[in-house]
Structures are given as structure tokens and as C-alpha cells.
Image: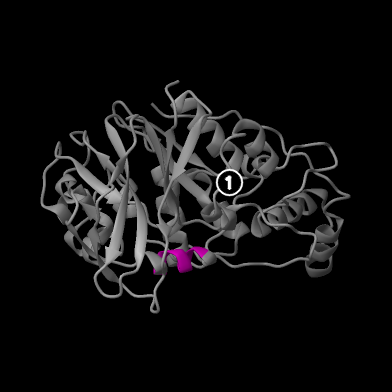
Amino acid sequence: MAYKWSHHPLEKDQRSHSSLIQYHQSLHSPSAAMAMTLFYLLSIVLLGGTRGSSSSGEMSPEAYWKRLLPRTPIPDYLQPFLPKDLTGGVEKKAYVPVLDQCKVYVAWRFGVTPEELKALHDTEFLFLPENLKPRSKTKKLDFVKKEREGREWHAFLPRRTAEAFPFSVSKLDGILKYFSIEPTSRAARDMKETLETCELEANEGESRYCATSLESMVDFAISQLKTNDVKLLSTSIIDKGTAAKGRVYTVQKGVTEFPYKDSVVCHVLGYPYAVFYCHKTVNTSSYVLPLVAEEDGSRVDAGAVCHTETSSWNPKHAAFQTLGVKPGAPMCHFLSYGHFAWVANSAP
């Protein structure tokens, strides 16, 4: 089923953001109150919002996380996605597309053509369940590059800003104008694909949601796992080695499988601010695999998930074409940077 949140009205805080409004006045000199509101909202959107609480007493995203997940610290790999602090001054950051993997993991119904498959960058992170065994070898993987690219990605918006801003294919023309993005550009194409993905109906037995704020992602994960005793599973690079290049890894002894089959897997999508496609699917197993690189002995504790129910997926899905299997066959993928799973530590 599709998961939806009710929207909250945007509360404008003129005192907190007076410097932003004055900045846009100097650039555009808007005479209408409606134009001023648009520039105010756009400033927050382009900059990623603020990290502190507003003067109205609204809880910060970090405080919201701590209240709902007191036993789960915010992991380091989520820090770049937290709303940025505006107190140091105004800085505009243009949208630079850096992602293609959304097609690899989330296009359950779109599928890809053989030509599109060749252009995808993350297919090497896909593998079959038999490769979970110790002494199995991976394809050439570049976890370090994925982590480095993460520094270029955009932050979440504060929830109130995100829910007040248009997020729909039907509003795409206006959204592109807000961000000064050419309709024929790659950035516009990325945004359209993200919005289309977020508006798809869920597959049978699946719950899905596109989170545009840290708070809404937390709410969705807790609601699906029915517990706030959770762990975030991703990939930890223990030894980065001397060169940030692809390596072939060997699976070591000590593969950890989490006991609960319910998990919520989230994938970052291409957009001018952070958007994560999160979904809870049936019959999904979660693992941590200790890996050692053949080239230099560098070590990685790689998070991975295996989907054992894929019969409803598009036959042209990138995973089937890459792995040479058909719908219904189980498939697994490592959690590279920008992808992680919420798993329960205890039964709900």
C-alpha cells in the first residue's frame, strides 16, 4: 500500500530568516507580498532549512530523532543529509546530478532497456544469495567513491518546509522554474523520474514512501516496523586503503543475519534536496558481510539485503538483467553510500 502523510501549514518566521528576505529583496526587489513569500520559501528550500528550533518552539530534526529513537544515535553517514545551519550566511547551491542508482534499485515497474542498463553505475552492487557464503568473491566494488560522492548530495528540508513545497509531477514545470532548471536538462529529467517513482502505487505486499524530511523518514520506519527499537544498517569502510578505486572483495567468516525479516530499505534519489525512496517489502533478509579486498587487504563491513519475493517486479528490472534471473528469483544488493536499511532489534 502507499503510505501518505497529512500536510502541515508552513509557519513563516520573519525574525529567524530576515537576512534571507533582505538578500532576495536586494536581488529581485519584489513588490508583491506573494512574490516575497515565494522568495522566502525558495531560500529555505535551496539552502536546506535550519538545524535549530524555530522561535515558535518547533522541535529540530535532531531533537525529533532523539525523542522517537532514544536508543538509536544518528549514524555518521546521515550527517550530510541533515538540514543545514543558515546562521553562518546565505549560500546558494545549484543542483548537480550525481546519481543514477535510483534506476537500479527502485524502478520496479519501469524496467530498463539494454542501452540504459549499460549506462547504470551501481549494477555491480547486485549479487545472488549464494554469494553470501564465506570465500565468495564480489565484483569490483568502489565503496570509497560512493562515500566521497555523498559529500555532493543535498540535505533534507525541515519537515514544515518540505510539506509546504510542491512535490508532484503535475507541478514539475513550476518546480523547475523555482530552481532555475532548464526543462530539457539532465537535472530536469532526474527530477521527473524521482517524482514519477514517488507517485507509483506500491506492489502487492509492499509499503512505500518518499521521505523529504528526516522526521517523516523516522515516522515511516517506526510505523512499518512497529517498534522504535531499531538499528540502521549500512556499509562501514574500516580501512580505506591508499587509493579510492574499485576492489574485488572476498567474503570472510562471520556473516551476520538479522533475525527479523521485516526491514525498511531507503535509497537516495536525484533531486535539489534530499529525497529518499523507502519501502518495506515482504520476505526481506538483512545482513552484514565482512569483506577483505584482494588488492590491498582493506576491510569493509558491508550491509546487504536480499529480496526473496520478486514475482511482481518488472521482468526488465535491472537486477534480473544483470544477474541473469527471472521474476520470482531472489536477489541481493549491497548498501552503498546513500542506501541503508532500518531493521528491528526486537520483536514488536
Residue 184 is at least partly visible in this image: no
Who's the residue at 76% across and 53% down the image?
A: 40
Between 199 and 301, the one lying in front of the other is 301
Who's the residue at 34% across and 75% down the image?
A: 245
Number of numbered tags placed on the structure image: 1
Residue, disc 1 = 74
Give the residues drawn in magenta, as a range: 145-150
Dividing the picture into quadrants, the one containing residue 66 is: top right
Who's the residue at 69% across and 55% down the image?
A: 42
Q: Main secondary structure of the magenta part?
A: helix
Indicate whether 320 appears above or below 20: above
Image coordinates for residue 89, horizontal then vertical, percent: 79, 66
Give the crowd class for mark 1: few <14, some 14-19, many >=20 residues within 10 Å.
some
Secondary structure of the residue carrying numbered label 1: loop
Indicate whether 5 appears above or below 131: above
Where, quadrant-wise, is the N terminus in this rendering? top left
Image coordinates for residue 318, horizontal then vertical, percent: 22, 53
Q: Amino acid at mark 1?
A: Ile
Between 127 and 206, the one lying in front of the other is 127
